[in-house]
């Protein structure tokens, strides 16, 4: 049995369904558990499928447990640099087009990925290799 916890976003509907009201999901299928964790929205809490005895899993939190806090990590005294984001050259064409849309930049006339990357770098003053936060402005604000 695999127990997963929703750790990112307010809800998720895909290989499994979870929300802030019900952040825990259990499945017996290892493929489903692996796919859910691979999305980045879930953390594996316990895996009781192996024959090796497991140490006790963390207790289920009280109702007031915050979805956005991680009990395993200490609160840093200074904010850490944001690890989220991706360099433009590492994005897919779909991600580049979405990023351009959210930044009100037209990629009309750009025939390939390299041309789209170049146009975005020029328009936004972004350097090669510089990571940018992309996606829905609403989700970016929620994740901050």
Image: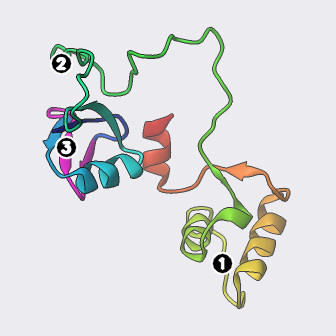
Nearest the viewer among 121 and 46 is 46
Is 124 situated above or below 92?
above
Residue 67 x/y as whole percent: 31, 27
Residue at which label 2 appears: 60
Q: Earlier in the sequence, mark 3 or mark 1?
A: 3
Residue at which label 3 appears: 18
Q: Residue at x 59, y 12 (%)?
A: 76
Tell me the SS state at disc 1: loop
Judged left or right of residue 99, residue 136 is: left
Residue at which label 1 appears: 106
Q: Residue at x 72, y 87 (%)?
A: 110
Mark pair 3, 2: CA separation? 15 Å
The stretch drawn in magenta includes residue 15? yes
Tell me the SS state at disc 3: strand
Judged left or right of residue 107, residue 13 is: left
| Residue 13 seen from this side | no
Mark pair 3, 1: CA separation? 36 Å
**How many residues crowd mark 1 within 10 Å: few (<14), some (14–19), many (20+)?**
some
Q: Earlier in the sequence, mark 3 or mark 2?
A: 3
Residue 4 x/y as whole percent: 25, 37
| Residue 22 seen from this side | yes
What is the quadrant of the N terminus in the image? Answer: top left
The stretch drawn in magenta includes residue 122? no
Q: Are marks 1 and 2 in contact (CB under 8 Å)?
A: no
Region of the chain picked out in magenta, as a range: 11-23
Q: Are marks 3 and 2 in contact (CB under 8 Å)?
A: no
Is 22 situated above or below 136?
above
């Amino acid at each position: 049995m695999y127990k997963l916890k929703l750790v990112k976003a307010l809800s998720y509907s895909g290989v499994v369904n979870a929300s802030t009201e019900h952040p825990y999901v259990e499945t017996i299928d290892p493929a489903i558990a692996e796919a859910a964790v691979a999305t980045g929205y879930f953390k594996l809490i316990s895996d009781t499928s192996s024959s090796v005895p497991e140490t006790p899993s963390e207790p289920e939190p009280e109702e007031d447990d915050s979805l956005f806090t991680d009990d395993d990590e200490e609160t840093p005294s200074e904010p850490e640099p944001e690890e989220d984001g991706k360099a433009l050259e590492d994005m897919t064409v779909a991600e580049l087009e979405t990023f351009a849309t959210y930044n009100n930049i037209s990629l009309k006339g750009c025939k390939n990925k390299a041309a789209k990357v170049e146009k975005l770098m020029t328009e936004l003053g972004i350097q090669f290799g510089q990571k940018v936060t992309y996606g829905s402005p609403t989700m970016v604000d929620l994740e901050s």
